[in-house]
Image: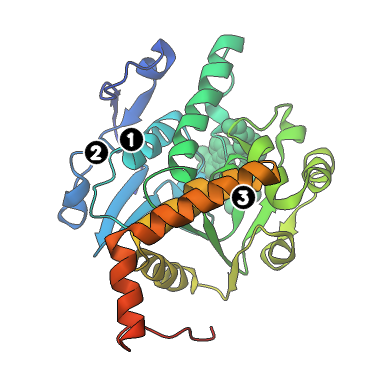
Amino acid sequence: MPDKAKRVFTVRPRAPHKLVQRMSVEKCRVSESHKDFSSIPLPASLIAERQGDIAILRLNRAHKRNALDDGTVIGIDAFFDALPGDINAVLLVGEGDNFSAGLDLSELKERDVTEGIQHSRLWHRAFEKIQFGKVPVVAVLQGAVVGGGLELAASAHVRVAERSAYYALPEGSRGIFVGGGGSVRLPRLIGVARMMDMMLTGRTYSAEEGQAMGLTTYLVEASKGFAKGLELAQRIASNAPLTNFAVMHTLPRIAESDPAAGFAMESLISSIAQADPEAKTRLRDFLEKRGPKVKQS
Ligand code: 1HE
């Protein structure tokens, strides 16, 4: 869908910086298929739908290769902030042949240093709500997963890549630096040396190569990404919510703690999870032959 007329974005309850207040987003479009999210102010560059307890957030700027303009990033922030409580997983997809070409370079020209910092912090806030939000997020990748598009993908918990997907960090050739959390998240996925090489030499990695490196979690054939992503999101959504929460919020922090603190945190969260009535029910179901057995995937 083409971009529509623009209007000033004024809806965030927490007073944003004046730069953010000035940023404009395309007019909110609400159709029957995503009426559940109608109270969330989304720009035309984002479409939200639901399938049961799965929310599907679609980058909808295929004509600009889903480049992330300010309105889109503000919309991502608003969407994850206001996700309804009955949603148990999110599927993040890009319309067209590319997941995302990263930062919308046309918006970069006139920013001064302070505005640059505020812009980067805006991305940090939005992507933090993905990585450390309410529910796990599965991203479906195809074509360009580039620059800020890779930073966005890196904030998801599971990445399903079609064979056409490729990863790149062209910031070096544009005279800029990652600003959407890439220097924090990507070294944790692929290592500092690989990220350095990608930024210095413009090296790209295919979806298949990305699998060995930890960027691609699942590799699938052309046009199979959505179905695989949805299947995984449904599987994730069927877990006990407290376990999903612990995996998202506690596991990465334990992994970065010193071992003594990590062991202590693990004991605490495991005892909190097992005391939850949901865990009691699930354990009883298994022991009484009603619960599912582990199946080889
Ligand atoms: C864009 C953008 C964009 C496409 N910002 N407008 N990202 C990049 O450096 C990647 C820049 N994009 C590309 O290298 C190519 O567009 C692609 C390889 C991704 C796709 O190529 P292609 O041939 O399919 O499309 P195209 O003809 O290059 O682009 C189609 C349109 O999208 C065209 O606009 P049009 O008005 O001429 O039709 C492009 O200008 C537009 N377009 N990508 C703005 N990125 C928080 S910091 C993050 C830092 C970064 O993300 S740096 C990396 C930025």
Q: Count residues near mark 3 (Cα–Cα under 10 Å), then give few for <14, some for 14-19, many for 20+.
A: few
Question: Which residue sits at x=76%, y=34%?
Answer: 173
Question: Which residue sits at x=61%, y=11%?
Answer: 113
Q: CA distance from mark 3 to mark 1?
A: 35 Å
Q: CA distance from mark 2 to mark 1?
A: 7 Å
Mark 3: secondary structure = helix
In terms of depth relative to the viewer, which is nearer, 256 or 182? Answer: 256
| Residue at numbered disc 2 | 40
Q: Position of residue 117 (x, y in %)?
A: 57, 17
Res 136 seen here: no
Mark 1: secondary structure = helix
Question: Which residue sits at x=66%, y=64%?
Answer: 207
Quick one: label 3 or label 1, which is nearer the N terminus? Answer: 1
User: Is residue 284 depicted above or below 130 in this figure?
Assistant: below
Amino acid of disc 2: Ile
Q: CA distance from mark 3 to mark 2?
A: 40 Å
| Image-quarter location of ligand 1 | top right
**3 or 2: mark nearer the eye:** 3
Amino acid of disc 3: Phe
Quick one: label 3 or label 2, which is nearer the N terminus? Answer: 2
| Residue at numbered disc 3 | 263
Mark 2: secondary structure = loop
Do the numbered discs 3 and 2 sit on residues whose CB atoms are within 8 Å? no
